[in-house]
Amino acid sequence: MLAPAIYLSAALFAIGTLGVIVRRNAIIIFLCIELQLNAVNLAFVALSRHVGIEGQIYVFFVMTVAAAEAAVGLAIIISIFRHYETVNVDKFNVLKW
Amino acid sequence: MLLDYSSSLHYLLALLPEAVLAAFAMWVLLAGVSRRRSGGLGKETGWLALAGLLVAGVANGWLYSGVAEGGTAAMIAVDRLRLFANWVFILGAGFAIVVALPYVARQKLQAGEYYSLVLFATVGMMVMAASRDLMLIFLGLELMSIAVYALAGYNRRDRRSAEAGLKYFLLGAFASAFLLFGIALLYGAAGSTNLHAISEALSAGAAVESLLGPGLALLTIGLAFKVSAVPFHMWTPDVYEGAPTPATAFMAAAVKAGAFVVLLRIFATGLGTLHAEWSGILWWVSALTMVFGNLVALVQSSVKRMLAYSSIAHGGYLLVAIVAANETAAAGLLFYLLVYTVMTIAAFAVVVTVANQGEGGNRMEDYQGLGTRRPVLSICMTVVLLALAGFPGTAGFIAKYHLLLGAAEASLWTLAVILALTTVVSYWYYLRVAWYMWMRDPPAEGRPTDYVITPFGTRVALVVSVALLVLAGIFPGAALEMAENSIRGIMYLAAPQAGAAGP
């Protein structure tokens, strides 16, 4: 069962990566990053069946970090929305990208 | 005193500097909230944060002076590498806070939260450097990064700061995901996230090959983002330019130092046996970073942005030490980090001062004739620029010389030549600022240079940094010996074949 789970997690991770690259809405990009983190969680849980219980504990660490990141990230998105009234990253061009 | 992890008190002792600093960070946060009610400018919270760094430094000194750990496999490392790195972080954070004091007051930023975020980020770096476990490294890295995302976007009234915050956040979180996936795959490949256990599994040939390769690649990409190595550097100039300048100083100096200590720890200890696999990729990353960083810095018209590219270029020099992966290079890397932290923050301190604690006066023209109007400030800036360029007689030269020695010992001749040539190129853009300061006439009445005022704290910080840079350039012995002692015994390298890395 290990290989299919790892392939699924790699596929989810790839979808997330692609989303970050092609989408232009800051919130969608952030969702894609969350998708990547959840792909990692899936990999940890699948691997922990073979390696040991730590993998399942790491999932809680990752979820906590993701929550903290969401708190700061959404605050930053709100603060930039107040300046530009959009969350399209192509419009943020005061600095050269 | 020998630490014995059967008692949980000893875990706390092993993490004493981090624990003290985290407690101070929360205290500063609370003090900031209560001060704002009474309407102060919040300088007291800055001093409180500096006191916290001092206490953490004392705790670090206690660990340094005679606490030993049993073995080299525990999750928390109590070794010289970590403690030396802690000195660098504490020094960097301290200078960054001193430089930030007048800026935060002038820009009316919320002081308590600012200093508290700096302290939390420092705790994150210390946890990273202290950790022999990939998962704990990840937690430390995130503690640092999340605090620094907020610092980059700290000035909410300035749209460039908000933009820098968003860019840093999105790309930083993206890089963290890569790093984490790499950690998960290595965990599957080697059966543990402990670097010591990984190293043993690799030497015994017990690792799962199909997971090892992708895991290593993803981990390298994630870390390359964090140290802003080409081709993963795109965020750096924008973020460094847009963020409030004292926050940029902190990011360019301490955050980069933290990332490099982790890079050294992971690649030299855990993955040392795979040197032949990763050194080829890092060879190219290092060469590209040096060439690109230096060439693009040549054409910058903003001093702040030029320093951002210069920090990319310095990352390239430091990567040479990681590729060389011997004790000489690693000791050179630690010494370089110490010197780099001091000179970067000093350079940004001058930038903050010339821009009058704002973001307006960062162009080269704003430095015109500064030499006649503000000679002491200009002399300090000139020494710092010479140190950044690696001029003989400054600490920057000694640091680069030791990186070159390490590269020569590993027979990385091409990389050493690139390092030397790009250093020569870098003289142009560093000395251009000095040329503007000394050789150009002061502009007509009413230009910003006339009103440049150096706050007292910044003066002290600048004089101390310049003294350190010159002293360590002439008598580097003590600091170098400390760096060499910090490295001894931490490397688990299979003897790297001469010239195996790169073409």
Image (cartoon, coloured by chain):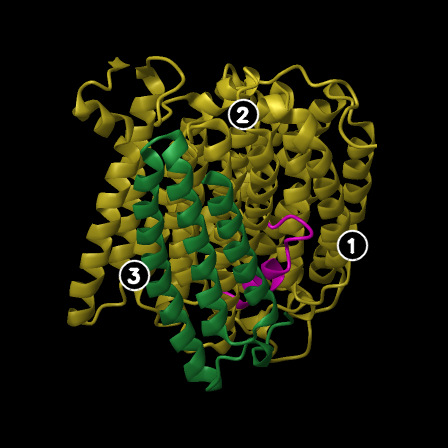
Chain colours: A green, B yellow
Q: Is B238 contained in the magenta span?
A: yes
- Chain letter of mark 1 equals B
Residue B13 location, x and y as percent?
23, 26
Q: Residues within 10 Å of mark 3 (few under 14, many from 20)?
A: many
Q: Residues within 10 Å of mark 2 (few under 14, many from 20)?
A: many
In the foreground, B245 or B19: B19
- In the picture of the structure, the residue carrying the numbered disc 3 is B113
Q: Amino acid at mark 2?
A: Ala
- Chain letter of mark 2 equals B
Residue A23 location, x and y as percent?
57, 73
User: Circle 1 sits in a helix, a strand or a loop, which is it?
Assistant: helix
Q: Amino acid at mark 1?
A: Leu
- Magenta range is B228-243
Work out whether mark 3 precedes mark 1 in sequence or the reverse, and give the earlier one.
Answer: 3
Q: Amino acid at mark 3?
A: Glu
- In the picture of the structure, the residue carrying the numbered disc 2 is B207
Q: What residue sits 42% from the left and 73% below the top? A: A77
Residue B48 location, x and y as percent?
25, 50
Q: Are marks 3 and 1 in contact (CB under 8 Å)?
A: no
